Image (spheres, grey):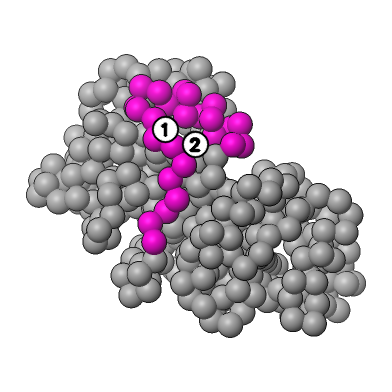
Amino acid sequence: MQAVVMNQYGSPDVLRLQQFPDRKPGPGWVEVDLAASALNWHDVLVRQGVFKSPLPHVPGADGCGYRRDTDEKVMIVPSLFWGNREAAPGSDWEILGDYRPGTYAERVCVPEECLVPLPRGWSITEGAALPLVGLTTYRALFTRGRLHSGESLLVLGASGGVATTAVRLAVATGARVVVTSDDPDKIAAAIELGAAAGIPHAGDDWTSNARALTAESQGFDLVLDSVGRWSESIACLRPGGRCVVLGSSASPTATLELRPYYFGQYELIGTTMGSPADMRNLLAMIDSAAVHPPVVDRVFTLAQAADAHSYMESGRAFGKIVLDHR
């Protein structure tokens, strides 16, 4: 089959469209003809060798297409072998495209439990853009973060897949959302999605400016930190507030002053992608609350995967980047 293959780790240029062996489905597995896949920052880390994926390798976690056995339209859930505990994944858990061939290809094999129907009225492109960020964001906001109607949410960043999905999901549940960005156009775009406001996150006083946007400047009920700015995130919380952490792009380490942390009765909550139950709950929310599809910034062809990665790394995108396989 045709696939985007990396024969070595490195820059976007290592991604080449070429022939790659098919993986035939075993018992309980299903082969899917992919019509589209979507990029995630996780794919960049795979390409760079952070997860030591076997070479040659096909990256990609998100995808949408047709089951070969039934021809049904399906989305790929990239969370494999979650396990029996909802609190955290088991020892066998992995993300599709880390160690098994991923979705930058004509076809992919996944466990049958990792296939879900495309929401009514959504396009193939929109379906490809949902699974990883949708599942990750749903778990962060609701399963782990316990966000509910009437609460306030601060989202660090305004333009990525997680941020744009967080705005849509949180607004749909009745929360008030504020975003951060140093790009006024991206703040304006987030407000069009439903955010109440946005602020620049540069400078020493940005956390005070953020708190000023909450009732009596008390701070936010929940902060979604996908970059790893823990001390600043906690400074934006109300007493007893919660900070959900799901990324480390700003720094791989963080330092906290402990006395303000425990006297503030704060919660620091780690999370990653979600379980099959989280995905079912996300799809139920999409259906019941009429949640809009993910924001898609640009669509590239499968052969343009290297250009798509370069574009994602440029930071210019607002929303998801998708590869069209047709």
Mark 1 residue type:
Pro
Which residue bears the numbered disc 2?
A: 43
Tell me what residue is drawn at x 20 percent, y 38 percent.
Answer: 33
Image location of residue 103, percent across then percent down: 34, 37
Tell me what residue is drawn at x 56 percent, y 75 percent.
Answer: 175
Residue sitting nearer the eye, 237 or 247: 237
Q: Is residue 89 left or right of residue 254?
A: left
Residue sitting nearer the eye, 228 or 317: 317
Residue sitting nearer the eye, 277 or 116: 116
| Residue 298 falls within the magenta-colored stretch | yes
Q: Quadrant of residue 261?
A: bottom right
Image location of residue 58, percent across then percent down: 38, 29
Which residue bears the numbered disc 1?
A: 59
Image location of residue 107, percent across then percent down: 24, 34
Q: As displayed, is residue 66 above or below residue 221? A: above
> Cα distance, mark 1 to mark 2?
6 Å
Q: As displayed, is residue 313 above or below residue 94? A: above
Q: Which residues are magenta?
A: 292-316
Q: Quadrant of residue 68?
A: top left
Whether label 1 touches label 2, CB < 8 Å: yes
Which of pointers 1 and 2 lies earlier in the amino acid sequence? 2
Q: As displayed, is residue 186 above or below residue 282? A: above
Residue sitting nearer the eye, 89 or 261: 261
- The tally of labels here is 2
Question: Which SS class for mark 1?
Answer: loop
Tell me what residue is drawn at x 61 percent, y 54 percent.
Answer: 188
Q: Quadrant of residue 83?
A: bottom left
